[in-house]
Image: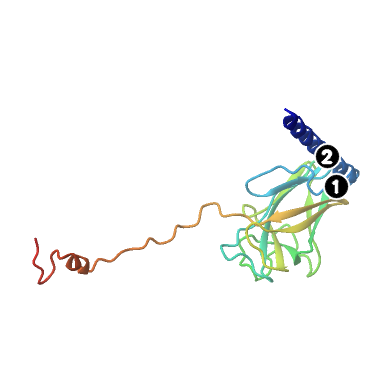
Amino acid sequence: MTRSIRGSRRSALLLAGLATSGLLLSGCSAGQVAETAGTVPSVQGVNVAAEGGVFAVRSLLIAYPGVDGYQAGDDANLDVVLYNDSPNQVTVTVTTEDARDIVLSDPHAPRGEGSSPSSTETEPPAGAPARITVPPLSHVQLNSEASTVLRLIGLNSRLHVGEAVFVTFDFDGTTIRAAAPVAVPLSPAAPPEPIIERHTGFEELEDGHGGAGGTGH
């Protein structure tokens, strides 16, 4: 009975400590845009909203690179949908510290051959951040289903499934910084080739069954 009471007290103290830690973390971010504010779990992509939910980044992820992943210096498509729930037009500036540049590109352009500007956007000069205009109470889709995508140019290091790069979205002064994960394949990898056993006939000779010169039964 004494052991049970002590165990309950330990659990209560542990839960209280966790709750206090949570309150301290919340207090530290007061008045700032939290990196995980408004995060909604999803199978593919990360969803993050600015404080107040006026601006949001949805379905953020890096295109699946294949089993070998990305190598340092490779380019990678960055899918995202930018939301503007304010009554004013906003310009979103996109930057990262994990690649040399971010540019607007044709999602189907071969990687490593630079970006292809869309009819409505102009490719920024080398080293300049990508900028996207989002109308009021609207959104802009930048992914493989649209005519334009964000492209990371010259990754700083190797990147595999389960890893991520940090990307910053500045909505005219309101900043959202989020980790863009590498997408996982939508279907499982093909199973390995089955081992095919070849029968030469010697198995039967060893057992004394059949074969040329065999006595048979």
Q: Residue 86, image x and y in percent?
A: 83, 41
Amino acid at pointer 2: Gly
Say above or below: 19 vs 93: above
User: Going 55% across and 52% down the picture, which residue do you hit?
Assistant: 186
Q: Nearer the viewer, mark 1 or mark 2?
A: 2
Contact, CB < 8 Å: mark 1 with mark 2?
no
Relative to 145, 1 lies left or right: right
The alpha-carbon separation of the residues under discs 1 and 2 comes to 25 Å
Residue 189 horizontal/vertical position (percent) = 50, 57
Looking at this rendering, what residue extends furthest in the top direction? 1
Q: Quadrant of the N terminus?
A: top right
- Closer to the camera in the image, 7 or 25: 7
> Whole-percent x and y of residue 192?
44, 60
| Horizontal side, residue 150 vs residue 176: left or right | left
According to the picture, the residue beneath numbered tag 1 turns out to be 33
Where does label 2 land, which residue? 17
Q: Quadrant of residue 116?
A: bottom right
How busy is the neighbourhood of tag 1: few (under 14 within 10 Å), some, or many (20 plus)? Answer: some
**Coloring basis for residues:** rainbow
Say whether disc 1 or disc 2 marks the residue closer to the N-terminus. Answer: 2
Image position of 80 (left or right of 212): right
Residue ranking furthest to the front = 2
Q: Position of residue 102 (x, y in %)?
A: 75, 63
> In the image, what residue type sits under mark 1?
Val
Kindly state the secondary structure of the residue where label 2 is placed: helix
Q: Nearer the viewer, residue 50 or 195?
A: 195
Question: Please, which residue is most extreme toward the right here?
Answer: 31
User: Looking at the picture, does residue 115 appear above or below residue 174?
Assistant: below
